[in-house]
Amino acid sequence: MAQHQSPVSTAFYIDLADVLDRLATFVDPIYVVGDLNVHLDRSDESTTIQLVDLLADHGLSCRVNTDMPTHDQGGVLDVITRDDLPAPPVDVLDVGLPTTVYCAGGY
């Protein structure tokens, strides 16, 4: 599933949970990638906690190194997850395009 979400709302979490529930019956492994507009580097924010908990409820965890910003203005807004373990960590590679930072990893 690829996703770009803006802005994050309560409905987003409900919809994402529904999509993940449906995918779990048809797809293995599940990958979630995209700009979710949740600052994963801010682990104490309610939106981050909600997203991390929702992903964990579906056996998913973020693989992006939260010490490396995925946005040109800083912060980790992009997520790469998968539900089958073990999974390699994903590092961020800035390829010099405006407002875009790409992630590179062992997928």
Image (cartoon, grey):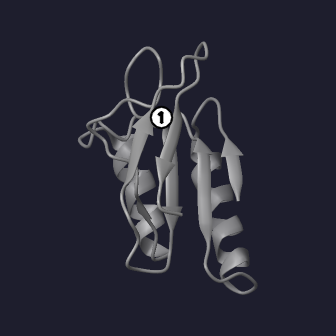
100 vs 73, nearest the viewer:
100
Horizontal placement of 74 versus 8: left or right?
A: left
Position of 88 relative to 76 (above/below): below
Name the amino acid type tagged 1: Leu
Q: Where is residue 48 in the image (x, y as percent from the top left)?
A: 38, 44
Q: Which residue corresponds to mark 1?
A: 77
Position of 44 relative to 54 (above/below): above
Q: How many marks?
A: 1
- Residue at 57% from the left image edge and 36% from the top image edge: 8
The quadrant the C terminus occupies is bottom right
Position of 58 relative to 50 (above/below): below
Q: Where is residue 29 in the image (x, y as percent from the top left)?
A: 61, 79
Q: Where is residue 58 in the image (x, y as percent from the top left)?
A: 50, 75
Q: Quadrant of residue 40?
A: top left
Q: Under tag 1, what secondary structure? A: loop
The quadrant the N terminus occupies is bottom right
Q: Please rate how many residues cluster around mark 1, counting C-alpha atoms within 10 Å: few if below 14, some from 14 to 19, many from 20.
A: some
103 vs 79, nearest the viewer:
103
- Residue at 31% from the left image edge and 41% from the top image edge: 66
Residue sitting at the far bottom = 25
23 vs 94, nearest the viewer:
94
- Residue at 65% from the left image edge and 37% from the top image edge: 5
41 vs 51, nearest the viewer:
41
